[in-house]
Image (cartoon, grey):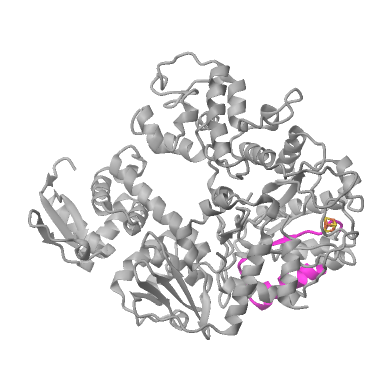
Amino acid sequence: MEILEKLKILADSAKYDASCSSSGSNRKNTKNGIGNANNSGICHTWGADGRCISLLKILFTNSCMYDCKYCINRSSNTVPRATFTPREVADLTINFYKRNYIEGLFLSSAVIKSPDYTMEKLLQTVNILRNEYNFNGYIHCKTIPGCSPELIDKLGLLVDRLSINIELPSNNSLKLLAPQKEKNGILKPMEYVSKNIMQNSQIKSKHKKLFVPAGQTTQLIIGATPETDLKILKLSEGLYTKLKLKRVYYSAYISINNDKNLPTLKAPPLLRENRLYQADWLLRFYGFTSDQLLDVSHPNFNTLLDPKCDWAIRHLDKFPVEINKADYYTLLRVPGIGVISAKRIILARRNFSLKFENLKKLGVVLKRAQYFITCQGKYYDKIYKFTPNFIERNLLYDERKTLIEQKFEQLSIFDNLLPAKEDKVKCLTGNL
Amino acid sequence: MSNWKLVNKVFLYDGTFEGFLSLVFYCFTLKTLPQKIYPIEKYYTNFLETTIAIETDYNKSKRVFDGIYNNISFDTLYNSFYAFLSDQKDKELNILKYLCDGFELGPKINSMLTVPYVFSVLSMKKRACSECHKLKGLVRFMEISNNIYYSSIHPDNNIIEPLGQHFIKRIPNQNFIIHDKNRNLCFLYNCSINQNNHSPYQNNGAVYQNNAVAYRNNDTSYQNNGPAYQIIDGSNFKLPKLSDKEKYYKLLWKVFFETIAIKERKNPRCQMQFMPKKYWDDLIEM
Ligand code: SF4
C-alpha cells in the first residue's frame, strides 16, 4: 500500500485521541542531531475542529485484535486496515520535521498479535528515530495495555511522554464496553511508569538518562457512560495526586458505533467537556479540590456558569477580597482573576496601592471580578450589597453572551481562566 | 527622569537596535528627551520640526547594552530588545523612557506596570514574543535544492532574527532561508560555517542582537563563534521550481491535516482565532 493511503487510514483512526501537546520536555539537540524540544510546546497548525496540531499523530496499525465497543478500530468493524513499518513512520517523521510541519511524533497503536508484539514495533520505530537518525524532537508514545515492564523500561528511556488511555471512568463501564482490556492491564503499566518517573527524578546526576521527561498522560471519554462529573473529577484528582500524571484529557464522546450499551448522541457533549477542562485547571493550578467544586447534592457542573463562578456564588461569605492585601491563592479564587493577573497584582502592588483603573491593565476581567473584590476598601460600583441572585444573573448574562457568540461549540472559553505558563500555549490553543 | 529636559526636536537613527542604543547613549549624556524618535527612512521631512540625526556607534551601543545588563537586569535588556522588534510606532520613545527610569530605579522598573511607558514596553515585548513563538510553529520549509530549505513569512513584528536562531538550534545541519516578505528581509543560515566555527559574515548589526538572545539562553557559543547567519535584503529572491519529491511531502502534509480533524467537532471560528488569516498565505495546508 502506498504511504499516502496508509497515512490517510492511520491518521483517521488516531484522531480521536485528544492529546497533541508537545510540552514538558527540554530535550536538547546533540552534535549531528536534528531537533530539540520546547518546554512550553509549539503548535504547528490548527485543524478544522480548532484543535492544535503539533505532532504527527498516527497509529502504527489499526488492525485490532480487541473489540472495545466505543472504538472505530474494534475488530468487529469493517473499516480499511493498514499497518506501517517502523522505517516508514521514522522517515515520515523526519521529513515532516525537517520542513517544520511538526514538533515530533505521537505514535499510538491498536493491538496487533499481542500487547508485547505491538510494543516491540513502537520501540523499533522510536529506536530508529533516536539512535539512527539522531532525532531529538518530541516523541509521545502509547503504552499498550498489558505489555511487559521490560519494554516500558526501554521505551521510557527514548520518548518524552508516555500515555495510556483509561477511556472509561469506572470499573463497570470498562467491563461493559472494553471487556478484553482489564482494568489492571491499564493501571499496572501506568503505576509502573509513574514509579519509574519518580525514581528517575530523584537521581541528581547531570548525566542521568531521561526517563519520560514530559511525564505521563491519559484520556477519559465523557458522555458514553453514566458517571457524574464528580466521579470523573475525583478520578482525575487521584491520578494527579497519586500517580503524578501530567495531564488528564477529556474527550466528548462521539457516536461512531451502534451498540446497545452505548448512547446515541446527536452531538458530542462539548460544553460538558469544556467544564471538566476548566475544573481540571482549577485542581492543578488554583489550589481547588474536587470536593470544593462538587458534592453529592451537586454532582454535575452548572452548564451555564464556569466552575469558578459557580463556586464563588455558592461561597459569597469568602468575599469581598481586598486586592491590596489578599494572598496569591485567595486572589486566584476570584472570578475574573487568573494565574497571570494574580501574579501581576502581587508584583504591581509592591510599588503602590492599586485602584480599579489599574486592574484592567493587569489583565483582570472586571466584568466578572467586580462583585468579589474591593480596592482600598471600596467596591467598584456604588452598589454595596450584592446578593447571590443579583450576581448570578449578571454573570449568567455575560457567559450566555459568550456562549452564544461562540455558538456553544467553542472549546476554549478560557477568558477568565488563564493557565499557568507551562500549559499556556496548549490550552489557549484549544488543544486540550 | 525628573531633571531631564524635554527638547522640541525629532531624533533620527538608522533603524537598527545598535543605532537605537547609540541614541540612548546620546540622550543620557545630554540628559535630554526628544519629542519624537524615528528611523531615518521612515521620517518625512516636516519643516516645522527640527531634527538631529544620531550616528550609530558600536562602542557606545555596546556600553549601553552592557550597562542595561549589569546595572538594571537581564529582563530589562530582553524586554527592550523584543519591544524594539515590535511594530508599534512610538516604540522608541517608550523604550527610552523605560530605560531612563530603569537606570535610576534598577530592576524594580519591571514591576511598575501602572506606569504607562513601562506597560507599553511590556506589552510590545509580549506581542513580539508571542508572534515569534507562533511562527516557530507556522514556518513551513520546502527543500528548494539539495539541503537548502526555504520559508516565507508575513509577520507583523520584525522577529526574523530570534526566529532564525530558533531554527539554527533545531536543524543545525540544514541550510535555510527565512524570508520576511513584509520587510523583504532574508535570514540566511549556512550550516557549514556553523560547523567549522568561523565567521566570515561580519554583520555588526547582528552580533549584539544575537547576544541578547544568547545571554537569555545561557549560551555562549554564539558569542565565541560569531554568527553563521546573516540578514540581507530579499527583494531579488526568486523561488525555484519545486521538485516532485517536495510536492509529494506537501501533499502528504495536506492529507494528514485534513484527516486529523474531527468532523463532528468542526469549529472554523476557533481555528481562525488561533491561526489568523494573515498567516495563511505561507501555509501549505490552508
Ligand atoms: S484496544 Fe484500542 S484500538 Fe483496539 S478496539 Fe480497543 S480502543 Fe480500539
Q: Is residue A104 magenta?
A: no
x then y, percent, for residue B206: 33, 70
Q: Residue at x 59, y 39 (%)?
A: A285
Residue B202 x, y percent position in the rendering: 31, 78
Find residue B139 and report its horizontal and vertical position in percent: 50, 67
Could you tell me residue B212's position as x and y percent? Answer: 37, 61
Image quadrant occupied by the N terminus of chain A: bottom right
Q: Is residue A122 magenta?
A: yes
Give left or right: position of A370 versus A15. Answer: left
| Any part of residue A56 in sight | no
The furthest residue to the top: A385
Q: Hey, which quadrant is residue A29 in on the image?
A: bottom right
Q: Which residues are magenta?
A: A120-146
The image shows residue B186, relative to residue A380, as above or below, that is below
Q: Is residue A315 visible?
A: yes
Taking depth in this image into account, of A393 and A25 the one nearest to the observer is A393
Residue most toward the bottom?
A: B146
Residue depicted at 83% across the width and 68% down the height: A81
On the picture, is A122 further left or further right than A200? right
Identity of the residue drawn at 61% across and 33% down: A306
Number of labels in the image equals 0
Q: Which quadrant holds residue A129? A: bottom right
Residue A190 or residue B231, whichever sits in front: B231
Assign ligand 1 to one image quadrant: bottom right
